[in-house]
Amino acid sequence: MSKITAAITAVGGYVPDFVLSNKVLETMVDTNDEWITTRTGIKERRILKEEGKGTSFLAIKAAEDLINKTGLDPKEIDLVIVATATPDMKAASTAAYTATQIGAVNAFSFDLEAACSSFLYGMSTVSAYIESGRYKKILLIGADKNSSFINYKDRATCIIFGDGAGAVLFEPNNEGLGLQDELMRSNGEGREFLQATYGGSSYPITEDTFQEGKHYVFQDGKTVFKNAVFNMADVAERILKRNNLTNDDISWLAAHQANKRIIDATANRINLEEKKVMMNIQKYGNTTSATLPLLLHDYESQLKKGDNIIFAAFGGGFTWGSIYFKWAYNS
Ligand code: UT7
């Protein structure tokens, strides 16, 4: 019997309608369109404005897009994972709410948090479940409402982050398509450089910390940048080497969209031409857990059965990794 692999068989996506452009940011903080464009590649990002709507709203929309496109019966879904760094609430699972709202009534569900690497870690988790033969239809959703913890007076973060969601369906494959290999890493010494310090269990929010805005996300951009460039390029190069792949064998690089210069550095390290590098950072900014599935959503029509894709991500924690993947369908 041939080995079961975990393939992606459908993709959906959603971004909110409200566009926050670099021009508008110029009126909010000391920045300008030219600086943001040349230093990050971002032109605009989407923001979920409606009151009382959290990450699950984005996740549900992305899942519904996938369901409507494919005619998938949500009752057949075995497991729903919401990869997110911005859950709706503490304690209550965002994935459980999402699964119920989309009609996945026979599924169990949980949230998975690894900052900007959440979706990549989710791909690893889902694939292990599928390869074991235990579950057959798993919905992995990457969703983040980053605007909920961004300080729009801090130019080191507000120019980068946006809101969005992408959903992918994983199913068993017996043609050898889907996840081929993975290299996943983390290093907790990096957490001081990118975190929202207050509001978790270490430091609950007090009146003073709230006034000082310490519940917002903070980053030492330069240090995060250096670590992202080094580590993402490193794992991408290593996964190619250990699978005896050259740049000619690779159809696409799907890299976390945090800064165009980080993506370019990763592509350069593995000698990949620009036309093979998926890029949508200019439209959405850094949507954290949603960048990888939104890339698949935007590029789906160009992907062909058998295409070799290198996924790579880096995020807070630090967390990072790379996955070598074979695409399973023509759309
Ligand atoms: O998703 C994973 C987590 N996040 C990331 O991977 C993000 C990683 N970091 C970055 O993308 C970049 O570090 C930033 C975009 C955050 C900052 O870019 P940078 O090239 O590292 O800028 P910098 O902090 O070294 O600052 C360079 C200059 C400074 O001015 P001087 O000292 O050279 O005169 C800053 O004051 O740019 C200035 N600057 C800005 N100017 C206009 C910093 N931020 C801005 C801004 N607008 N938003």
Image (tube, grey):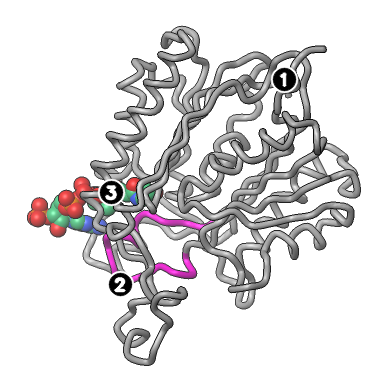
Q: Kindly indicate the quadrant of the structure image that contains residue 6.
A: top right
Q: Residues within 10 Å of mark 3 (few under 14, many from 20)?
A: some
- C-alpha distance separating marks 3 and 2: 20 Å
* SS at circle 3: helix
Label 2 sits on residue: 153
**Where residue 330 is drawn, which disc sits there?**
1
Give 242 or 322, whichever is nearer the viewer: 242
Q: Residues within 10 Å of mark 2 (few under 14, many from 20)?
A: some
* Labels 3, 2: front one: 3
- Looking at the image, is mark 3 or mark 2 earlier in the sequence? 2
Q: Main secondary structure of the magenta part?
A: loop
What kind of residue is marked 2? Lys
- C-alpha distance separating marks 1 and 3: 37 Å
* Labels 1, 3: front one: 3
Magenta residue span: 147-163
Label 3 sits on residue: 224
